[in-house]
Image (cartoon, rainbow, N blue to C red):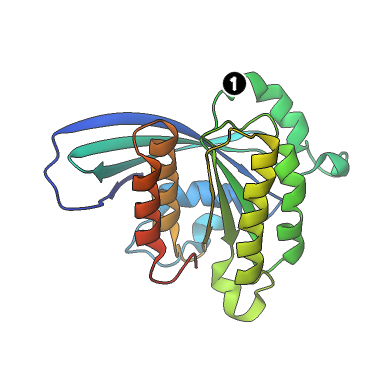
Amino acid sequence: MMTQLQNENTAVDNVVRVTGQVLAVGNGAVGKTSIAKMLQEYKPSVSNYENIISKIRRTNNLEFEFLVSEISQGKTRYSVVSQILVPPGQKKTEMGKAGRTFEQVMDLYRFHIKSVDIIILTYNISARNSFIDLKYWLNAVNGYYNPTTNFLLVGTHLDQADEYRKVLPADIEKGQSQIEQFFKMKMPDWKGSCFAVEISNINGKNMEKLEFLISKSILWARGHLSAKEFMESYNFLFQSNGYY
């Protein structure tokens, strides 16, 4: 899907094509594959995607999706191509239960994954264990991030928040801080950040915010945005109602 994300009403002098890589990890059935599909299918005029989501099956390999976003920064228009990689959510400790594990699949493709700009840490806001298990995934992605990789803490099933929320805003804020501390210890020259957003794959809420974060993160990681410009965009986007 081609999506236009405008920052400001300015004249555009040229178009720059930028390609980045996104890796989505998390427990099985939290919605990783659905996120990748929704980023392609989302339209502001549509409010129900159950027909699309119901056809998605368990991931047993490394799945690929591509998202093209157009975004303006000053007088430059960027065409941002996001290659979204979705491996299985089965852990090494669950080997033999059903299908291949994250580790088995990633070992097959390790040499094809060169520079991950964004790692999406995915959890279900109505399943607290999926949030707690992100500790496992923080270690599992070792070797796939670099000093300019950003981490996105993405909570799914936002449409169930009123009745079934098990992960609270305080948990998310604490998680962001702990994730940043974790990677600063693992990689002292890490310059990235951990951002948070909650989305619904059923009604599409906040999918535009997620796409914006992905596109801006790639532009920053690839040297097209300064840290100040990126943070100004992030603060403007989330100033009204936070990450949900």
Which residue occupies 63% across, 35% down? Answer: 188
For residue 223, above or below residue 28: above
Q: How many marks can you see?
A: 1
Secondary structure at badge 1 equals helix
Q: Label 1: how many residues lie within 10 Å, few (<14), some (14-19) or many (20+)?
A: few
Q: Farthest residue to the front: give it.
A: 188
- Taking 66 as reference, is 46 above or below it? below
Q: Residue 185: which quarter of the image?
A: top right
Location of mark 1 (residue)? 112
Q: Position of residue 228 (x, y in %)?
A: 37, 46
Left or right relative to 183: residue 200: left
From the top left corner, tell me how far across and down residue 15 is, in percent.
22, 32
> Quadrant where the N terminus lies?
top left
Residue placed furthest toward the bottom: 163
Q: Quadrant of residue 70?
A: top left
Question: For the point 76% across and 54% down, which residue is it?
Answer: 133
Residue 33 appears in the rendering: yes
Q: In the rendered view, does 144 fall on the left or right side of 130?
A: left
Q: Is residue 55 visible?
A: no
The residue nearer to you, when weighing 56 against 146, is 146
Quarter of the figure with residue 92: top right
The x, y position of residue 9, in whole percent, is 15, 52
The spot of residue 241 in percent (x, y) is 43, 71
Question: What's the amino acid at mark 1?
Answer: His
The residue lying at 30 percent from left, 35 percent from top is 79
Q: Is residue 62 above or below residue 69?
A: above
